[in-house]
Image: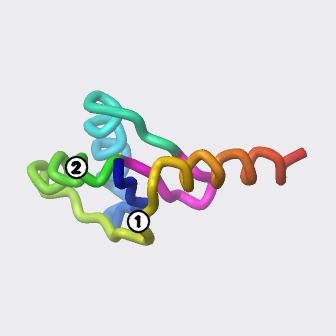
Amino acid sequence: MRMVKIQFADRAREAEGFVALAKQGRVVCFSDDTYEIAKAHLKILDDLHISYQVASEDGFDDVCHALRNSLAAQI
């Protein structure tokens, strides 16, 4: 499964976009206001006309690795 890391371009609609994505699948939230979602779920945001920027595209294993490292850095 291909995953993309996104940032919402419109901060006012970020919550709406997050809720719409969370209803349809897994959303990984990072502390730098980026979200990791399945690439196929970009269509949800497109259908709602919520603008976003794709920061990177990774595989699911890369996402798990990033989560592990970000949590360990807080300790």
Question: Which mark identifies residue 26?
Answer: none
Image quadrant of residue 15?
top left
Question: Which mark identifies residue 40?
Answer: 2
- Neighbor class of circle 2 (other Cα within 10 Å; few <14, some 14-19, many 20+) is few
Residue type of the residue flagged with mark 2: Ala
Q: Residue furthest right?
A: 75
Residue type of the residue flagged with mark 1: Glu
Q: Position of residue 48 (x, y in %)?
A: 13, 49
Image quadrant of residue 56?
bottom left
Q: For the image shown, how many numbered marks are present on the structure?
A: 2
Image quadrant of residue 46?
bottom left
* Residue drawn at x 58%, y 51% as measured from the top left: 30
Residue bounds of the magenta highlight: 29-37
Q: Circle 1 sits on which residue?
A: 57
Counting residues from the N terminus, which is met first, the one under dot 2 or under dot 1? 2
Q: Position of residue 21 (x, y in %)?
A: 30, 39
| Distance in Å between CA atoms under marks 2 and 1 | 12 Å
